[in-house]
Every structure is written in C-alpha cells, then in structure tokens.
Amino acid sequence: MAIAASDVVTEYGSYYLDHGQSAQDLYAKLLRPSVTASHFRTVPTTETVKRYGTAELNRILQPFQKAFTPIGTTTFKPTKIELYELKIDMQEFPDDIADSWLSFLEGPGIKRADWPLVRWLMEVKIPERRDEDYELNEAYAGVFAAPTPGTAGGAGTAMDGIKQVMTALGARINTITMGAIPSADIDFCTYVEDYVKNHPIEYRRRIDNVYMNETLHLRYREGKRQKYNASYAQAADLDTLYHFPNVKVVGLPSHGASNKLWSTLPSNRLRLVKRNPKSLEVQEGTPRQVNIYGDWWEALNFQHPESVFKSDLA
Amino acid sequence: MTETSPEIKDQLAQILENQKALAERNDELAIENGKLKKQLDELASKGLPKDGVEAEEPVIPAESFKVNKSVFKFNLARFFVPGIGEVSATDALADKKKRKELAIDGKDLTITEWLVAKGSGVIDEVVA
C-alpha cells in the first residue's frame, strides 16, 4: 500500500549520495517457496467450475447356469470442483524513495511504471511474497470466505486448501483411524508404516507419497534411522518406507502444525488453473501513483475422492 | 434272443447310477428351494423387497456412546480401523465385541473403546 522508507531516511539522511549501492545491497529474510502445488498435476482450464464423474461397477463374475441371472450395478457420482479467484493488488508512490539512499531504484526521465523500483518489486519481491502467502496461508490451511466489499480479505480466506477440501468431501475420502501421534520417533516410524499398511492392498503399491508437516517428516527420518539401525548410502533412503519403497514421506511447509497424514495416486492430485498466476500488470493511476496487480483462478482438489486416504487427526 | 454284452451292461448300470444321483440331487435342491422361498416370504412380510436391497450410504449416527464415563459422538460416517478394515460409524456403535486385533496392553477392546483409547479424530467428546 505504501513504501515505508522512514528508517532508511532516519539512518542515512533524506538525500541521495551515490556510493555505488544497488539492489544487491538490499537483503531480506528468507521466504518459503511454493512447494505444495508442485505435487499437484496442473490442468489449465477456461472454466471456473470443473465437472468430473466417477464410475464404479460392482461384482459381475458368477458361476454358470442356463438361467439369465444379471448382477452388477454401475454407480455414477459427480465430482464438481469450483475454482477460486485470487488476486494481488499493490499501490505505490515511487517518489517516496527519491530523496534517500534508495534512490538508485529511481528512474529519472522515465515513466514511474518503468522505474527500477517497480521492476524489482514485480520481478523479485512480489513473486517471493506471493509464493509464501500461497504456501503458508492458502494451499493447505485456506478456508474460503467471501471478502467484505471494499475491504481486503484476510489471510487464509482466498480459497479452500487441501485440508478443507478433504473435510468437505466427508466420507468420500477414506479415513484410516490411527489415533494420536506417538511421542517417540521410532514409534512414529511404525505409525506411518501402519498407516500405509492399512491402505487397501491395491493402493499400497500405487501411492507415491505420504504427506505431512515438516516436523513430522523429520521425526519419521529419525525414527527410521533408529528403528532399522542401518547406515544409508543416500539421504533419500530415510524418506522411503521399509516394506513399501515406492512410498516416500514428504513434509510440506503448508501443513504447519497439522498432524494429518494423507496420500493418493499421483494422477489424482489436481491443480486447476485459469489464467497465469505469475502474470502481473502495472499501471500509472493518479499522478505519480503506480498500481501493480494480478489475478487468476485456481483450485487444489482430487479427481477421484474415493482414491484419497487420510489419517483421522486434524 | 441275443444276450446283452458285458460292456453294454456296465454302461447301463452307470447310466442308472447317474440317474439315481441326479434324482437325489433334485430332491436336495427342491428342499433348499422351499427353504429359500419361505425366507423370501418372511422378508416380504417385513416390507422388504424380494429382489434385495441396495446398500445405503452410511450416515453419521446421531446417538452418542459412553466410554469410561465420558460421552462421545461420531463425526464421520465410515472409516478404516487397522486390523479390522472398513467400518461404518453405525456398525461401530452397535458392535460390542471385544477384539484381540484392537488389544492395548493385553486388553481386548471394542471398536469404540479403541477409538477413545487412541484419541481418534473420528469421534468428538461431548462436553455437558
């Protein structure tokens, strides 16, 4: 909404002295990259509601007899996935940095929309911040809430994240009751192994990852090291399951403190996207004011909810 | 009159034996048929269709249950219980069987007792 440069002005003065400073002299704390969405298959769409169907046919094979004895019911169920519209709105007065140490970001003689400050925001700072906001607030923990007109919506309300999606799908998602997370790492390793063992047999060799929060991921690695008391040539070995080497444990930043484990077939994880999430536009509005904005539609969801498994904790 | 050859006599004996076996099997099937018809009539008298009933979608039971003086309610209609398989909340509520597969510290437990002991998220404690 504004450039807050008062601390720089206080420290370095409200004048510009060229000591060769550049954008490389600007440092920032590390932000979390967007990881969760990379585990979902991106499906571009022009629609804002995507409709799929599931089809199940029950038993049809039976012993022979002359009489015609038909069995087998084909059950169709709808799967509707609504996309959510997300946006970035920023408004800056680039002149706020003109008379300060930061003036190397000024662009004398060119439009403010083309100033290095604006380019630096669009190419560096906004993508970093967008990715962290998406990862930590929306991708897993988001619960959509329509914003009050004229007021910016709160963090975590732009879309339904994976956790809310699974809650909304109710009994269509398979819940495996595992109970409380054990306190000992070695027991937690067994907990994860039991979680996979209790998938229906046809799924155990087909799922690729068990997703959880990053702390639990680390606890699994420690637990596996203790349990099997072997040295592993590659760090990646500590991420796989002993009896199911096709399954990897993956810690996602988006899961925060959630104790939920979940898994599904790789092709079942969908990220539906309308418009390019990375696209930004810039416009000089009222004199000397620059607006930077971008918007897109997206949803993280599952094509066949009946092939999704989760543990029973929040 | 020519005498019947031993081979033909053997074949005839075999045919007669087969006929007897088929007749006995027929009698067994007739008895079983009668029993099945009786069962269908009993079901029909209870208002259930003779063609069979399609499995209903499981629902979250409204009833609560008590374990160790605490009251709980299910928040999910169906779930997998390790060692047991897929269970509906309604069936779990009705099931009073102490199971070895769900034993904790050597004590066999019912499904609901096990869910409480494990701190499962498929049940919520009802606070008065």
Image (tube, coloured by chain):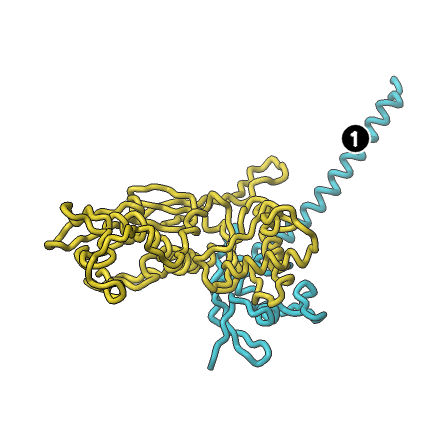
Chain colours: A yellow, B cyan
Q: Closest to the observer: A250 or B11?
A: A250
Residue flagged by tag 1: what amino acid is it?
Answer: Ile
**In the displayed structure, would residue A167 be above or below residue A124?**
below
Residue furthest to the top in view is B2
The percent coordinates of residue A190 (x first, y second) are: 64, 59
Helix, strand, or loop for circle 1?
helix
Q: Which residue is disc 1 drawn over?
A: B15
Residue A182 visible in this rendered orientation of the protein = yes
Taking the image as shown, residue A4 lies to the left or right of residue A180, namely: left
The residue located at (19%, 60%) in the rendering is A15
Place of residue A5 in the rendered image (x, y in percent of width and height, measured from the top left): 24, 62
What residue appears at the point 30 percent right and 49 percent down from the top-left corner? A297
Q: Position of residue A24 (x, y in %)?
A: 33, 50
Subunit under mark 1:
B
Q: Is residue B101 left or right of residue A121?
A: right
Image coordinates for residue A79, horizontal then vertical, percent: 39, 49
Residue A168 makes an appearance in the image: no
Q: Mark 1 Cα within 10 Å, few/some/many (few <14, many 20+)?
A: few
Q: Please tell me which residue lies in front, B6 or A88.
A: A88
